[in-house]
Each structure stands twice: as structure tokens, then as C-alpha cells.
Amino acid sequence: MSTIRDVASRAGVAISTVSAVINRSAPTSAAVVARVEQAIAEIGYMPQRAAQTLRSGRSRLIGLIIPDIANPHFATVARVVESVCLRAGYMTFIYNTDEDSDHEMQILKMMRMQRVAGLILISTRSDAKHGARLMAEIGVPTVLMGSHVGGTPFDIITLDDVRAGRLAMGRLLDLGHRRIAAMAGRSGVSTNEERLEGCRLAFADRGLAFGDVEIVLANFSEERAFDETRRLLSRKQRPTAIVSLSNLMTIGVMRAFVAERLESPRDVSIVGIDDFEWAEIMNPQPTTIAQPIVEMTEAAITRLLDQIKTGHKPSGRRLCFEPRLVVRASCGAPA
């Protein structure tokens, strides 16, 4: 039987490096990960946990793949998944994609080697081409959260993102704003596209044209949102309000207000989608669109564990949760 020493020799790396790749216990370059994975495949090495699972015929491991563990929203998802899984007798592996689809594929390969019983996946893309890549890697019960992925049969737990965008933009329009910028995430992600569609519908609801809204793609990144907001605010005709389509981008926007010595809502109003647990200590307290993330996560893991237990195939159903407008201090009428 092949050993971890054999893998290290074949890949030309240290045993500790092979262990780091298998267990994701230390930062490792993509090139080294690829070499180790190739060596594992060539010599048929099976990590100890996977070998034990194969002998018993059962796995008690659940994989959770999220875009950004530093994001409080996804940290809550991880906490709830881990708690529910522990009560059900499962361990949880949590992996972070950094919004990188190739890294997502590498993680899925590792999950397959660990022979997880099931996956909860918040994917980096929503297109059918990416869906085909996922289907080539995933062979266990899987539930999607957040964005749907074309060409996949998996159940999905999501916010009503169209409604969320509609509520956020509607709040600004009802206050009288017309020169509005939308701090958006990344094209090709259903969460982003549906929230933007909700923004368009808010204009249509009021018989207004959406064409003058500037859409800025900030890749769901706090730093990108900070830079893009400073660019917007440097203009002579700066927007009177900004709608931000994710929580980290909202933080970036608010940081830019501070950097430019502007106050919200006196100078610029903001509404953000995704709430903050610590919103009360922010200045100003942000108006947000909240989602019931705990209930959504519990629904996702419950559905996954049911599929694992019963062997039922996914239904492909989409379970939508309602967003809620939380009015705080960051919005006012345009100056």
C-alpha cells in the first residue's frame, strides 16, 4: 500500500508539504497543490481518514465551501453548519475559495479525496460552463446556498435577491434620490444579477428610467468598493446616494466617506444589502436589507442531511427567504 512518503517522493516535496495539501493546514502554492494531487492520483494513495471511511462504508464528514471566511456573513454560515452537524454526529470541513473558481475546483478535488458525505457550496460563478465543471467533481449529496449554478440539479437555499434589490433602491428613491450609484459585485453571479434586477424594478415601479444609474463592479471586495467610491465622490456631480449589494462592499463605501471627509446622510446616503451584528456601534448606523441567515443555513444543512440519510436525489427546488428593510441613520433626503 502506498504511503505519504511515496507521494512526497513522487511530487518532489517534503512529507510535511503533502500533509499540508491534504489537510489544508498551511498555505501552499497552486503549483505545489497540483503536483501533490497528481502524485496522489498516479500512485493511488488514500489519506488515512478516507481509507477508514472506505472500510466502514460510511462518512461522517460534511464539506462547507464559502467565498470568504473573513466575511461575517459567511462566518455565521460556518458557525451554524458546524453546530447542526455536531448535533447530528458529523464533522465539518470548512474551505475558503477567495472568490476564485479555479481554487474552488481544487477544493472540490480535495473533498473527493476525503470522501465527504455531502457538501454545502456557495459557488463563485453561476454560469452553465461552471456548472459542468462542478458536476465533473461532485459525486455526493450537495446543497447550494446563495447563488444558483446553471446546469446543476442541486437544491438551493437563497434570499429573494430581486426583492432585496428592490427594497434597497426603493428606499433611496422614496427619499427623493435620483443620482444614485450601485456598488455591485461581479457579473456572472446570480446574487449580483438578481439584486441589480431588483434595483431596476424599483425604478420601474415608480415610472422612472434606470439608465442614469452608474453600476460599478467591485467584486464583492471591501478594498475595491473603497477605491471605486472615492473615484465616484471625486466628481463634481457626485452621486447623492449609493446602494451597496453586499456587506463588505458597504464597509468599503463607508470607509471612503470617512477618507473624503463626507458625512452620511448629510452628503451622501447609503443603503447596503446584508446586515451587521454590530450595526449599533457603526457611525452612522447603516440602513440595510437583512436576511435570515441562521434560518437559511439551518434549512440548507437539514436538507443536506436528509438527502444523505434517505439517499433521495436533489429536487432542484429553490427555497427563497424574504429580505427585511432595517431603517437606520445612513439615509436621508438629498441635499
Image: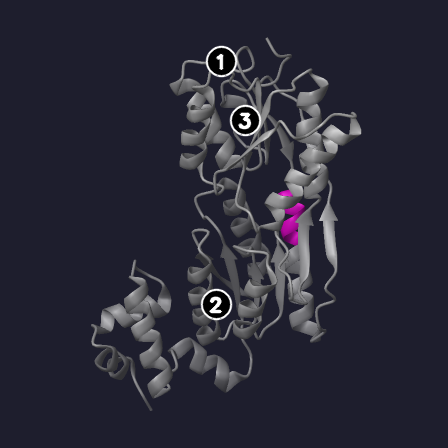
Query: The residue tagged with tag 1: helix, strand or loop?
Result: loop
Position of residue 226 measured from the top left corner of the image (x, y, whole percent) = 42, 30
Depth check, mark 3 against mark 1: the one in front is 1
Q: Residue 233 placed where, x, y %?
A: 46, 20
Instruction: For label 2, count other residues whose C-alpha is less than 10 Å away and answer few (under 14), some (14-19) or many (20+).
Output: many
Q: CA distance from mark 3 to mark 1?
A: 17 Å
Residue drawn at x 59%, y 59% is 127
Q: Which residue is mark 1?
A: 263
Mark sitting earlier along the chain (2/3)? 2
Q: Nearer the viewer, mark 2 or mark 3?
A: 2
State the residue at coordinates (67%, 50%). 158
Would you say the residues marked 3 and 1 are in contact, meaning their CB atoms lie under 8 Å apart?
Answer: no
Q: Judge by depth and name the residue closer to the eye, 126 or 141.
A: 126
Instruction: Give residue 279's mark.
Output: 3
Q: Amino acid at mark 2?
A: Leu
Residue assigned mark 2: 108
Question: Marks 2 and 1: in contact by CB < 8 Å?
Answer: no
First-in-chain label (3 vs 1):
1
User: What is the number of the mark on residue 249?
Assistant: none
Query: Which quadrant does the C terminus fall into?
Result: top right
